[in-house]
């Protein structure tokens, strides 16, 4: 895929705010990463888990100073909101779903070009944008014109998410499209996500997935030295005393792989299944599969397709998002 800048409508994602003196402590007791020590402008990935350590949602948590902004894929929204309603007392940590009044526009592509585009559109300092760490943010303008500019690595090759009032984001979208930047199709956005190696709930993860199986530790979503949180016992036991039996991996193949197809090792043993699959203009057929841990990165596997088998090479996922063929 070309690194020319492109736009992505990320407004369907769940966006919630958490405010009040107990907001950080409350979320800290629910999420896998350290949100208590965040300072304004800093952000982290984190996961919300069931008491049995299974993934409910992969989240992004950003300290905006006055509150915390938490967002996640639309597919994870129902489960995460249910968790918040069950465990969070709104009198101690006031929370709100702000999807109805806000929007999110992604600007992705070559880093320098994205910095220039976003700086010009939002009136921010290019040097400040370029200095942002992943998942961290700065605020452009004030009041109704305020836009939270987040350095995002959710889609390859990275870029920025612009979050603000719906009318403001619509104006920015019109400005960027007028300059020749096009809105990506859902297919193109999915290719960029898979090349970034970021799993999505309902595709590569479900209610039976353990965080380390989905490589959420590699994505920086787990702090193993923080205080207690829901599901911590399972995550900590695996990290300090054992291992998971399977992992998400990239599969590089000679032809597109069907979702759900079984994966076999060199001896013909079934060792996994394909969870998502795209045809990347730059990378060729690329899939994410859940495979047994004994299948080492670099191994060749066979994937069943219509009674035949296609060869594929197993690769470890993770940032940076470049796929080495």
Image (tube, helix red, strand yellow):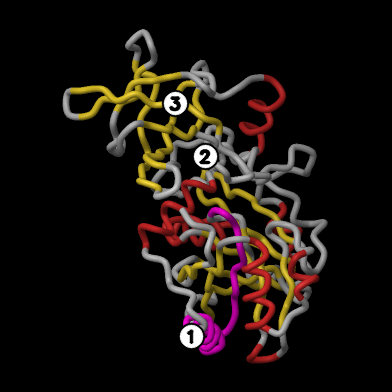
Instruction: Kindly check if marks 3 and 2 are in contact, taking CB atoms under 8 A apart as contact.
Output: no
Categorize mark 3 by other alpha carbons within 10 Å: few (<14), some (14-19), many (20+): some
Look at mark 2 in the image and give the residue it sits on: 54
In the image, 18 versus 248, the foreground residue is: 248
* The quarter of the displayed image where residue 265 is located: top left
Q: Helix, strand, or loop for circle 3? A: strand
Image position of 183 with respect to 274: above or below = below
In the image, 180 versus 38, the foreground residue is: 180
Look at mark 1 in the image and give the residue it sits on: 178
- The residue segment tinted magenta is 156-177
Look at mark 3 in the image and give the residue it sits on: 313
| Residue 52 percent across, percent down from the top left | 54, 36
Of the two numbered discs 2 and 1 on the same chain, state the one appearing first in sequence. 2
Q: Helix, strand, or loop for circle 1? A: helix
In the image, 47 versus 121, the foreground residue is: 121
Q: Residue at x 32, y 11 (%)?
A: 268
Label 1 and label 3: CA atoms lie apart by 42 Å
Of the two numbered discs 1 and 3 on the same chain, state the one appearing first in sequence. 1
Label 2 and label 1: CA atoms lie apart by 44 Å
Q: Residue at x 72, y 24 (%)?
A: 240
Q: Residue at x 65, y 61 (%)?
A: 111
Image position of 311 with respect to 52: above or below = above
Q: Helix, strand, or loop for circle 2? A: loop
Image position of 134 with respect to 17: above or below = above
């Amino acid at each position: 895929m070309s690194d020319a800048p492109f736009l992505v409508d990320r407004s369907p994602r769940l966006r919630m705010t958490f405010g009040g003196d107990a907001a950080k402590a409350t979320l800290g007791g629910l999420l896998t990463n350290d949100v208590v020590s965040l300072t304004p402008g800093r952000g982290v990935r984190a996961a919300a888990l069931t008491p049995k350590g299974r993934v409910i949602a992969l989240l992004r948590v950003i300290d905006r100073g006055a509150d915390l902004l938490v967002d996640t894929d639309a597919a994870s929204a129902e489960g995460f909101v249910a968790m918040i309603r069950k465990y969070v007392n709104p009198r101690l940590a006031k929370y709100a779903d702000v999807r109805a009044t806000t929007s999110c526009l992604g600007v992705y592509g070559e880093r320098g070009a994205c910095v220039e585009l976003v700086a010009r559109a939002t009136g921010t300092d290019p040097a400040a944008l370029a200095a942002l760490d992943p998942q961290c943010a700065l605020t452009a303008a004030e009041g109704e014109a305020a836009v939270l500019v987040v350095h995002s690595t959710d889609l390859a090759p990275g870029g920025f998410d612009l979050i603000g009032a719906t009318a403001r984001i619509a104006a920015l979208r019109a400005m960027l499209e007028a300059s020749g930047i096009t809105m990506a199709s859902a297919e193109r956005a999915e290719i960029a996500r898979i090349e970034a190696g970021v799993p999505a709930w309902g595709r590569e993860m479900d209610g039976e997935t353990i965080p380390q199986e989905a490589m959420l530790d590699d994505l920086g979503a787990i702090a193993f030295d923080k205080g207690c949180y829901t599901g911590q016992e399972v995550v900590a036991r695996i990290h300090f005393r054992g291992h998971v039996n399977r992992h998400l991996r990239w599969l590089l193949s000679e032809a597109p792989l069907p979702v759900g197809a079984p994966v076999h090792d060199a001896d013909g043993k079934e060792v996994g299944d394909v969870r998502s699959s795209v045809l990347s203009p730059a990378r060729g057929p690329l899939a994410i599969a859940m495979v047994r841990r004994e299948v080492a990165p670099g191994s060749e596997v066979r994937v069943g397709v219509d009674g035949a088998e296609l060869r594929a090479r197993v690769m470890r996922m993770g940032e940076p998002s470049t796929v080495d063929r």
